[in-house]
Image (spheres, rainbow, N blue to C red):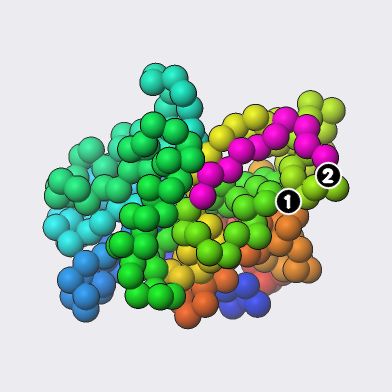
Amino acid sequence: MSIEFDTARGKVHVFGDTDRLAFGLADLITAQARRAVAARRRFTLALSGAHAPLSAYRLLAEPPFKEELPWQGMHIFFVEERWEEAEEARGHEDALREAFLDAVPLPPGHVHSMRAAVSLGDAAARYDRLLHAAFPEDGIGPDLVVLGVETDGSTASLFPYSPALRQQHRTAMEVTVSRAADAETEEAVLTEEDAGTPGSARAVSIAGSRHVTLTAPFLNSARVVVFVASGPARTHILKEVIEGPEDPQRLPAQLVKPAAGDLVWYLDTEAAALLSRARR
């Protein structure tokens, strides 16, 4: 069971703890998959590598979900990937494979990696082409997208003030986070001196990193987008993103507004603690 209420930025579901949140998300994925395969003979799922949904992903590889999911009709896409040159470096795909992808009967070729390229630019261009081929109907994207939201208001690899936020035509693109860019160019300013400010630990952790990410227009083509967050670290940023004024350059998660689909939030009680309706 969860508390549910509507906001200007989607329907919020608040679960009593992280275990209930994980089960609720696994149940949502299963219901959406069964419905899509029955109606269209395939289910397309785009997954974030955020920490909060991982417990739900693990449940998908266990009964009862493993037996209930229509794996033969499912296609898995990735929302983002951190690009590392070292072969031993772990990325989001590795975490998702460990969580459930390597333990379920998905057909060969139904997991669409972002990493099958020799360079960051090639990886982004290849994924852009792959998505255009997989979703040829204009404006109709994945059946379900699962996203996290970070303490700086970012989602996927769409970071505050990044030029990627202004992308309107591509489905996927490369993102390089500068170490100390000029704020007047609207690129992220990420320095060690920012320590102690909201989102500063996140800023320092991604400084100098390179990523492939789905773009906001493509995320907004989804039939359903669900944001997942848990714990007290995201309490303040969720209050801003869900109930605060429109400021998507500072809070990129606000860019996610499915054009013809549904936006929902799956939160535990700690993450939702400052939301007005959750406190009643």
Q: Position of residue 148 (x, y in %)?
A: 53, 51
Residue at image mark 1: 161
Left or right relative to 185: residue 76: left
Label 1 Cα neighbours within 10 Å, binned few <14 / some 14-19 / many ≥20: many
Residue type beneath disc 2: Ala
Q: Say which residue appears at 60% left-offset and 32% top-offset.
A: 209
Label 2 Cα neighbours within 10 Å, binned few <14 / some 14-19 / many ≥20: few
Residue at image mark 2: 183
Determine whether the residue tagged by mark 2 lies in a helix, strand or loop.
Answer: helix
Q: Within the image, what quadrant is residue 101 found in?
A: top left
The region drawn magenta spans 173-183
Q: Say which residue appears at 21% left-offset and 75% top-offset.
A: 40
Residue 143 is labelled as none
Is 110 included in the stretch rendered in magenta?
no
Q: Say which residue appears at 39% left-offset and 31% top-offset.
A: 118
Is 177 included in the stretch rendered in magenta?
yes
Q: Within the image, what quadrant is residue 64 found in?
A: bottom left
Q: Position of residue 82 (x, y in %)?
A: 49, 36
